[in-house]
Amino acid sequence: MRRAARWILAGAAAVAVAYGVWSRAGRRPPSEPVDLNLTGVQSFGEDRGNGNLLGIQPWMVPSDYASEERFRRKLDGYLGAARKAGLVGPDTVVVLPEYLGTWLVVVGEKASVYSAATVAEATRAMAFSNLPSLLRWTLVSPAPDRTRYALFRMKARSMAATYDRVLSGLARSYGVTLVGGSIVLPDPRIRDGRLAAGSGPLYNVCVVYGPDGRAQKPVVRKAFLIADERPFLAAGKVEDLRAYVTPAGKLGVLICADAWYPEAYEALARQRADLIVAPSYVFGDRSWERPWGGYENGRPRGSQPAQGRLTEEEAWMAYAMPARLGDSGARAGMTVFLRGRLWDLGSDGESFAVANGVTHMSQRRDAAALINLWLPR
């Protein structure tokens, strides 16, 4: 019996060692250069010395998230192109899209994660190579979708650190206010000007960085979650929205669906925000021209049930920022979409700016784009 037990323990140890070696192998990031896929720069208005909103609609692919350096190089490439075009200055507010930081969950993973054809395949590959951590967080998950919670929870600290180092460094290097796009993190906080992951429920959040590279308090938390987010994310509170003081004016940030609800604009109007931006993401290729499915969080007061009669694009124009900015007292706003080939998720959307009652649309393209709005007085 003792000999059998020793053989069993030896076998288990060998399996554990073999698994450890296998799980660490194949994690070297790809060597090919990042591809900006930047085909257009559009600018609206005139430079009157009042600053500008600069939207970066990036084109992201899984390998852009293989390492912190690749992620930094991708975003630095877009900002460098904007500076070369004369669109970067001390009064510039740079806007990045929803979920840009969320895919930092795959930093440092095996090559099979980046080459997977679908999110499901990538998730399986990531789960198998991180089984101990995945099991730990699955067992304590407070969310109905235990797997998604566990994947983001086990990588939370490294995700927050990468997001913070890259975006803080870019804001400081270019001397701009930077709206960092959103990232999924557990109850994050700003401590001494740096982003830190907390514990507990996951939130879809965004951080604003000042020209000195310091993260501004508080973290922006998405309040109106869509159906796909509810199984693993917690909702923020509209009343917690804050306006940030920037060189270009007081800035409010609404994450995607929040820009459809009057309560969000009212919260920012009470703080006299005069700029409002909305980092956003629309799932699915060619979804911009498909029938709109309607509100996923209940119809806002005063709106009409028009799903099925409008396209996704028409609904954004009729019910989101172009229709609501005027009532907020803000003088200008911008909505920026995430584009790219992130496994089989698809993406669509046409970034736009709003000022003086006029909506300026970027050119529709399956590529990266820069959209600039010179601010009116």
Image (cartoon, grey):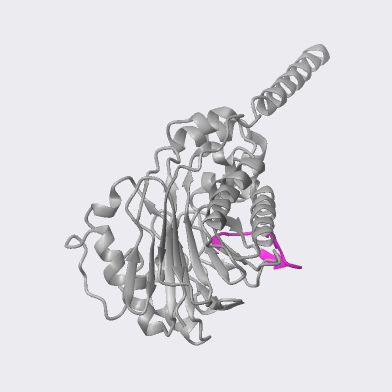
Q: Please give left or right for residue 343 compared with residue 111 in the image.
A: left
Between 331 and 243, the one lying in front of the other is: 331
Q: Residue furthest left?
A: 309
Q: Nearer the viewer, residue 77 or 233?
A: 77
- Number of callouts in the render? 0
Q: Classify residue 18 as left or right of residue 278.
A: right
Q: Tell whether position 17 is magenta.
A: no
**Image quadrant assignment for residue 160:** bottom right
Q: Quadrant of residue 370?
A: bottom left
Tell me where residue 194 appears, x and y as whole percent.
Answer: 72, 63
Q: x%, y% of residue 28?
A: 66, 29
Q: Is residue 376 visible?
A: yes
Give me the residue at 51% from left, 75% from top. Answer: 252
Q: Nearer the viewer, residue 102 or 361?
A: 361
User: In the displayed structure, would residue 243 be above or below residue 348?
Assistant: below
Residue 120, position in %: x, y? Answer: 45, 36
Depth check, front residue: 122 or 288: 288
For residue 296, which quarter of the picture? bottom left
Q: Which residues are magenta?
A: 189-205
Q: Is residue 204 magenta?
A: yes
Left or right: residue 318 versus residue 212 is: left
**Residue shown at 60%/56% (left/top)?**
185
Does residue 225 appear in this view? no
Residue located at (47% from left, 85% from top): 269
Residue 61 in percent (x, y) is at: 49, 40
Q: Is residue 161 above or below residue 309?
A: above
> Compared to 21, does 350 lie above or below?
below
Image point (75%, 22%), residue name: 17
Say which quadrant the N terminus sits in. Answer: top right
